[in-house]
Image: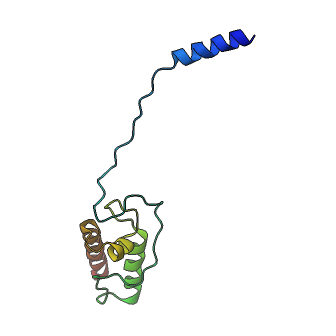
């Protein structure tokens, strides 16, 4: 009985093909100023973002802009919100572009 189990185990082991050790490539390179090992995305709660002028907006519009900046992840791959990336990594160009896009969208929406 033990012999047949041993032979069966050897047969199964011999039939298993060698498995390649594939590692998925990142979707986009992470900016050098951003940390590499980060937890899952967690929204932030910033009420002020450096370099972002919210004075042209009414209070409800300002709240909506801040909501978007705190809830939308930065596209640089750092896995933090746009507001948190701007606060922690002011040199991040992806963050700056995304924030400018959001401000332009909100200005356009407020003019309609």
Classify the position of the C terminus by image quarter: bottom left
Q: Position of residue 104 (x, y in %)?
A: 25, 75
Q: Residue furthest right?
A: 1
Image coloring type: rainbow
- Identify which residue, 65 or 73, lies in the foreground: 73
Q: Quadrant of residue 50?
A: bottom left
Residue 55 lies, with reference to residue 90, above or below; the image says: below
Q: Residue at x 34, y 59 (%)?
A: 77
- Identify which residue, 97 or 50, lies in the foreground: 50
Residue 26 lies, with reference to residue 70, above or below; the image says: above
- Identify which residue, 52 or 68, lies in the foreground: 52
Q: Residue at x 40, y 66 (%)?
A: 80
Q: Is residue 88 left or right of residue 41?
A: left
Q: Is residue 5 left or right of residue 26?
A: right
Classify the position of the N terminus by image quarter: top right
Q: Position of residue 26 (x, y in %)?
A: 34, 48
Q: Quadrant of residue 13?
A: top right
Residue 52 lies, with reference to residue 18, above or below; the image says: below
So how many labels did they put on this image? 0
Residue 21 lies, with reference to residue 37, above or below; the image says: above
Q: Position of residue 47 (x, y in %)?
A: 42, 84
Q: Quadrant of residue 88?
A: bottom left
- Identify which residue, 92 or 18, lies in the foreground: 18
Q: Position of residue 22 (x, y in %)?
A: 39, 36
């Amino acid at each position: 009985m033990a012999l047949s189990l041993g032979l069966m185990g050897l047969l199964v082991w011999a039939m298993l093909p060698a498995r390649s050790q594939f590692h998925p490539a990142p979707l986009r390179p992470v900016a050098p100023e951003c940390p590499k090992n980060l937890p899952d995305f967690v929204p932030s709660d910033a009420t002020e973002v450096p370099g972002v002028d919210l004075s042209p907006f009414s209070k409800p519009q300002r709240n909506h802009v801040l909501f978007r900046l705190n809830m939308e992840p930065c596209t640089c791959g750092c896995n933090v919100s746009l507001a948190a990336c701007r606060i922690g990594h002011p040199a991040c160009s992806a963050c700056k572009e995304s924030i400018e896009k959001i401000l332009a969208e909100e200005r356009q929406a407020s003019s309609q």
